[in-house]
Amino acid sequence: MLKINKYLLFLIGLSIQFINISCDNKDIEPRTREMEMAELDKKIRELEANGIDVDTTNMSVFYFVIEEGDGPFPKIGDSCLVSYKSFLLPTFEPFEFSEEIHPDGKWRFKFKPAHKVIGLINGIGYMNRGAKLEMYITSDNAFGSKGNSSVPPFTTLIYQTEMHDLFSNE
């Protein structure tokens, strides 16, 4: 009886492994730059069709103004206080929210070009105190062809940002 139970357990374990291997997502088509650009193009056309004026930064970060701010724009070395929510295009799956990471939900940082998502810093450069923007940052200015543990390769990031405060370094 004991031998039969061990044999049965072995067969069940083997069956589970076989099911896992056969259900593996090997058939999913790998993401490409062309797929990403088609998704982004579709989204930008949708925004424009709804009367939203989409602009681009000098690094080709697409953005639109939700609310105008006032005062100067950040310069290298200035201190910024920003909140954000980010999502993956095309699924709008949440990626990262400042309220989950930073005390009081606001990211305090020195404005400088070096950052893992260079497109986010570039877009923030187009914000002044009180401004709210929605940005579309391609993989070229984010996590690239490799992605990371939360972002698939060739994925555009959407950032909804607000500049709460800006302090000059001068």
Image (spheres, rainbow, N blue to C red):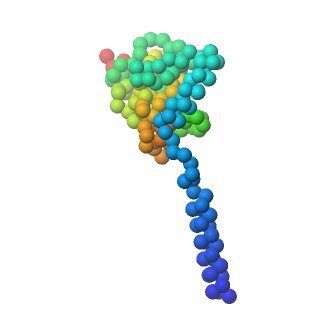
Image quarter of residue 44:
top right
The image shows residue 139 at horizontal and vertical percentages of: 45, 34
Quadrant containing the C terminus in the rendered view: top left
Q: Is residue 140 left or right of residue 133?
A: left
Q: Residue at x 59, y 18 (%)?
A: 48
Q: Nearer the viewer, residue 88 or 126?
A: 88
Q: Is residue 19 above or below residue 96?
A: below
Tell me if residue 10 can be seen.
yes
Q: Is residue 99 above or below residue 163?
A: below
Q: Is residue 156 left or right of residue 78?
A: right
Q: Is residue 69 left or right of residue 76?
A: right
Q: Is residue 167 left or right of residue 32?
A: left
Q: Residue at x 45, y 44 (%)?
A: 148
Q: Residue at x 36, y 22 (%)?
A: 78
Q: Residue at x 62, y 64 (%)?
A: 19
Q: Is residue 119 above or below residue 3?
A: above
